[in-house]
Amino acid sequence: MALGWNFALASGELARIHFLVSQTPPSSGFFLSQTDPDSDVTIYFSGGLTIQPSGPVAIPEPATWVLLGSGLLGLVAWGRHQARARSCHPPRSTRRSIVMPRMAP
C-alpha cells in the first residue's frame, strides 16, 4: 500500500499530515483498502494534508511554572516529613550490648 503527496511549502507555511487506519471505509476522499484473504477482514488507509500559515509556536508558560512549583512543594513537604520522622524516632545506636545470663553460685 502506498499513499503520498507532492507539495512545496512557502516561507512561513506549515504542513500537517494525518493518517487514519480503520475497519470502516472513509465517507469521502481517497483511500486504500487491503483485504486479508484468509479472514476476509478489510482495513482502510486514508490520510490528509493541510497547509496553513505558521505563526509563533505557543509556549505553555503557566503550565510549566505550575508543574515546577508543585514539584518543588512536594520536595519541601517530603523533606519536612523526613525531618519530623527523624526527630520522633532518633536513630538507633550501632553499638549493641550483650547481656549475659547470671550463673547460679
Image (cartoon, rainbow, N blue to C red):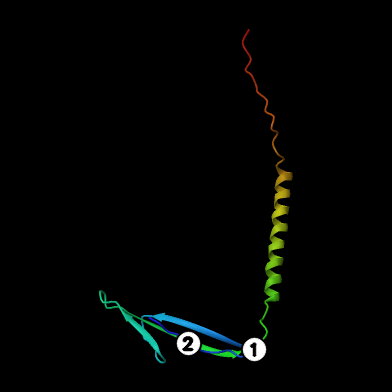
Residue 22 at x, y percent in the picture: 39, 80
Disc 1 designates what residue?
A: 12
Determine which quarter of the picture holds residue 4.
bottom left
Residue for point 70% across, 75% down:
62
Give the residue furthest to the left: 38
Determine which quarter of the picture holds residue 2.
bottom left
Numbered disc 2: secondary structure: loop
Q: In terms of depth relative to the viewer, which is nearer, 105 or 3?
A: 3
> In the drawing, does residue 28 fall left or right of residue 87?
left
Measure the alpha-carbon separation of dots 1 and 2.
19 Å
Q: Amino acid at mark 2?
A: Trp
Q: Is residue 103 above or below residue 30?
A: above
Residue 42 at x, y percent in the picture: 32, 80
Disc 2 designates what residue?
A: 5
Residue for point 66% across, 87% down:
55
Give the residue furthest to the top: 105
Residue for point 54% across, 85% down:
16
Whichever of labels 1 and 2 marks the residue nearer the N terminus, that label is 2
**Quadrant occupied by the N terminus:** bottom left
Residue 82 at x, y percent in the picture: 70, 50
Q: Amino acid at mark 1?
A: Gly
> In the drawing, does residue 10 fall left or right of residue 73?
left
